[in-house]
Image: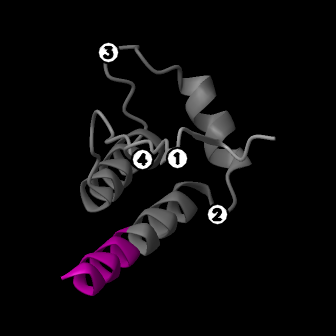
Amino acid sequence: MTTGTQHGRVARRSAQTPDTVVDPLTFSIVKALISFVIYGQGVTFGGWVNEVSIARINSAVYGGYKGILSGAAISGIFSIYDAVLKK
């Protein structure tokens, strides 16, 4: 009968550290900026983004690009709140 130990030792795994760490506040700011430029202003970056895709995504998202901006603002505020709690 084994209980998960070998010769009285318990095997422990060290927690894996992530390879890259993404700052949620920076992500929220960049998301809001890119969303405003693409969906709000219709910038295609020289044809990289299709105008039909911009219109389709903008109409599919609740509230259009303003809804995306609201979500980015909420996640940005939450990231600041989370950082304050960790300090």
The residue indicated by pointer 3 is 46
Question: Residue type at mark 1?
Answer: Gly
Q: Which residue is mark 1?
A: 8
Nearer the N terminus, badge 2 or badge 3? 3
Residue 76 x %, y %: 35, 69
Which type of secondary structure does the marked residue at label 3 adopt? loop
User: Quick one: label 4 or label 2, which is nearer the N terminus?
Assistant: 4
Q: Split into 4 quadrants, where in the image is the N terminus?
A: top right
N-term mark: 1 or 3 = 1
Q: Amino acid at mark 2?
A: Gly
Q: Estimate how packed mark 3 is, as few (under 14), some (14 to 19) or many (20 or more) residues with alpha carbons within 10 Å.
A: few
- Image coords of residue 36 (percent x, y): 38, 51
Q: Which sits earlier in the primary sequence, circle 1 or circle 2?
A: 1
Q: What amino acid does circle 4 point to?
A: Ser
Splitting the image into 4 quarters, where does residue 72 fall? bottom left
- Asked whether disc 4 touches disc 2, contact meaning CB atoms under 8 Å apart, the reply is no
Q: CA distance from mark 2 to mark 3?
A: 26 Å
Q: Is residue 79 magenta?
A: yes
Q: Which residue is mark 4?
A: 35
Q: Does residue 12 appear left or right of residue 14 in this picture?
A: right
| Label 2 sits on residue | 63
**Residue 19: where, in percent of width, then height?**
29, 33
* Count of numbered labels shown in the rendering: 4
Spatial distance from mark 4 to mark 3, Cα to Cα? 16 Å
Residue at point 37%, 40% (across, down)? 16
